[in-house]
Amino acid sequence: MSGNDLREAFFQECEDLLEALQEGLQQIDSPEHDPETVHAVFRAVHSIKGGAGAFGLDALVQFAHRFETVLDRLREGEISADGPTIKLFYRAGDHLSDLVAMARSGDDAAEPDGAELLGALDELAGDAEDEDLSDLSFQPMTLDLDMIGAPDPDAACEKAGQSASGAARWLIDFTPTAALYASGNDPALLFRSLAQLGALTVHADTSGVAPLETAEPGPPGLRWQLELETDAALPDILAVFEFVEGMCGLEITPAADSLYGEDGPKPALPDNAAPGEATAIDAASASDPTAAANDETSPPADAGAGGPDGHDSAPPPATPANVPGSPPMNGPTNGGKATGAPQPTIRVNLDRVDRLINLVGELVIKEAMLAQSIAQLELPNDSSLHAGLDGLKQLAGDIQEGVMAIRAQPVKPMFQRMFRIVREAAAATGKQVRLDVQGEHTEVDKTVIERLVDPLTHMIRNAVDHGLETPEERLGAGKPAEGRVMLSAAHRSGRVMIEISDDGGGVDRERVRAIAERKGLVTPGADLTATEIDNLLFLPGFSSKDQVSNLSGRGVGLDVARSEIEALGGRVLITSRAGAGTTFSISLPLTLAVLEGMVVEVAGQTLVLPISVIQETLQPSSVAIHPLGRDSHVLANRGDLVPLVDLGARLGYRSEPPVLDDRVLLIVQLDNGRRGALVVDRIHDQRQVVIKSLERNYGQVKGVAAATILGDGRIALIIDPDEVIGAGAEPPPGDMPAAATG
Amino acid sequence: MKDTQTESTNRNGELVAFQVSGQDFCIDIMSVREIRGWTETTILPHAQDYVKGVINLRGAVVPVIDLSSRLGLGPTEPGPRHVIIITMIDGRTVGLLADVVSDILSVADAALQPVPDIASESARAYVSGVIATDQGMLRKIELARLLPASRPEVA
């Protein structure tokens, strides 16, 4: 049981690592990349190898090992990541993730690609191949010797314990800021205190000091490297700097090897611990001069030894923050900590979160019920009950927001997967494609993300397969041979917009039309607008590819993608410009659990409209309403003629053409960019409502998105304005409603 | 459906008996979750007349079916004396509107007789069998037939 848990934990870890790997490869592929990225990629592969070794997943270990060997050469600068190499890396990364997936499912069918890939990797690995085949232990990162004072924290290990047993040697990198001097502190006094702890060597680094001619009164440039041999423990050393905390860059490292290069002192001490082990303590932890404070900065030794992955959370050794002249703000950090290190996270069973969300939903409903009963008491306004209720409301709202935030996830992992989809689609179609992503940190409810993966995959493939032209066609059209697919996500007025655009030839409307006519999807010669033709692509059974490719073009892609998105309460829009490309815009609710709604009354029924679609509310008397045909009306609003729809009549609650005088008009934004006006009897309230499924026990109802429970415990229906206004004709009364009708 | 059949042939089934428009009906007790008093429902647009609307059952949205209307006995004007029998039908929670719950009884399988041929088509559509009792006759409702088999493919 616990073995399985461990195994599962390993595979979850693998997911993160593979994601880091993909991301790293993309960075290496980009024009300017940080050398650290190569290390990150190497570490990811290495950690997978280490974990796989522990679980006896030999195929995985072997492949990861070869891959790692090549990456090692890249790291050493023996090979460079040029075009073909990086492509190989991508493929190796894909293969690795396949192997992980196979190991996870216990399926050990041979990957056809594997042997060839291995050969290519071995070729790159060169003669370095055999030397460390047996080396499955963790190999510490190499130190960047040219970066003074930036010891490698990757193999970080708490050394304070050892110092208690005997004299230990500490390297102290000390960079005072102007604030230190301004507050009357003197480095010399600090050094004197340090000297009392043990033998101290001081080395002043004046390289940051500007020459006198150009010197300006500004940040001080002096920096000291101290070497202290003492049997005092780390907290004692930190105590010396206690009063200058936040006013200096400070790094204290148990000396492992000389980090000073040529010009520094190089004493050798026999009782040194394993070379390469170092701990970096930022001055922030000096505020709490206990050893425990170090946990924040670097994993303690025992955690690091628990598995080969222990080093992953440690910051990369790049960019030392304590550069002279750039004093860090408060509590200087050690290199890269602020940028590189992931926030600590925990993995929680989703059920628990969902249970919590349900409970919070009930809490919000209860709170609303309570508010309603209190309102009926007609207490004076200054009653303490009101204040208490307001507090409760606030709290319930905060809790709800907090709980929802747990479910919110960045779309990044999903976007990362799309890189592979694009690569594979490009390989299968012989096109050159580059995928650019934007807004990958946009957060969306986890369920939304999960259910979006398939439709998004369809649409990305579609963009590569149908959207982009072949390189020859592109060159002929004066475009670069490499096609571009853009994937972006952004929050827009309470919804998430995800756009997939390509710079291909746009929808070939003539052909789409011809195909649709041939397949009997439209009447030949029908008068169709460009938008209508574009939307034919979403029809079931439409496949514009003359030859069915094994990528997309099965004719199930887009219509299935659309219905999946609509099932999430989302919409898809297509816009296309001939020669310039096609854009699919997906608009999705942020969450499937709550909705900011306007509570209205129609024909005695209480209904909820999503606030995000309501543009304005109007008094009917204030606008001009024109009859159009027998029963329909339009109204002029902001230069548009907007169809007027009586919500009650459209939902079948009442039949008579309403007398509009004492009603309210809601101008709503529809997803096709048009607008509509809904007639309601009264606006009650605006509030957050908890979305309850109507489908679970009943089924879909045309015009109704979902249901919610109001303060009085009754159910109110949440209206889908698009369906209400879009459905021009009264739908025939169904039985208990049949399956979804798009 | 399957449940009721196996139960009716293999063992003594317990039944919940109730009245709808003056006639006595019963359903298998295993499908009954609870019995509630009538509460106002929220009307669903475009629903069949026998769907009275939906109610809030501890946070779940539950449709209520007017049995009288569904069985072809005319619509019910529900009042505070009516009851809603909450049942599980085919994985769905559905409320059945009835006049009054009269009894819970244990009936031997042998007592369940096929619907007489004389019964009208509408009655045969929802009634799977009849049971003769001292007071008269109980019609056993086949719950699955109350709902059309139109469960959404993707829940």
Image (tube, coloured by chain):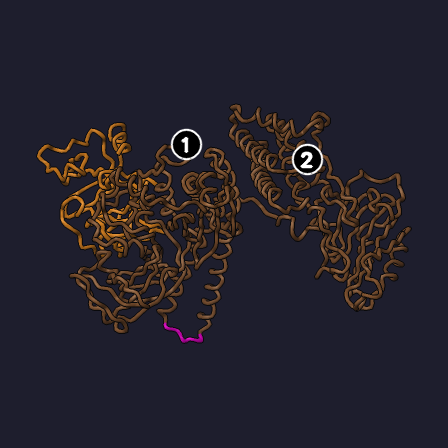
Chain colours: A brown, B orange
Image position of A129 with respect to A667: above or below: above
| Disc number for residue A79 | 2
Amino acid carrying label 2: it is: Ile
Would you call the spot at circle 1 few (<14 residues within 10 Å), some (14-19), or many (20 or more)? few
Task: Specify the subunit that label 1 lies on.
Answer: A
Q: Position of residue A194 (x, y in %)?
A: 87, 56
Magenta range is A378-382
Residue B134 located left or right of residue B143: left
Whether residue A442 appears in magenta in the rendering, the answer is no
Q: Tell me if residue A54 can be seen.
A: no
Describe the element under mark 2 as helix, strand or loop: loop
At horizontal 73% and vertical 41% (from top left) the residue drawn is: A155
Q: Chain of mark 2?
A: A
Residue A242 in view: yes
A170 left or right of B112 in image: right
Please state the horizontal and vertical placement of residue B151, each as a whole percent of the image: 29, 41
Rendered residue at 60%/42% (across/down): A29
The x, y position of residue A685, in whole percent, is 36, 66
Magenta part, dominant SS: loop
Q: Where does label 1 land, which residue?
A: A550
Question: Mark 2 packing: few (<14 Cα in 10 Å), some, or many (20+)?
Answer: some
Q: Closer to the observer: label 1 or label 2?
A: 2
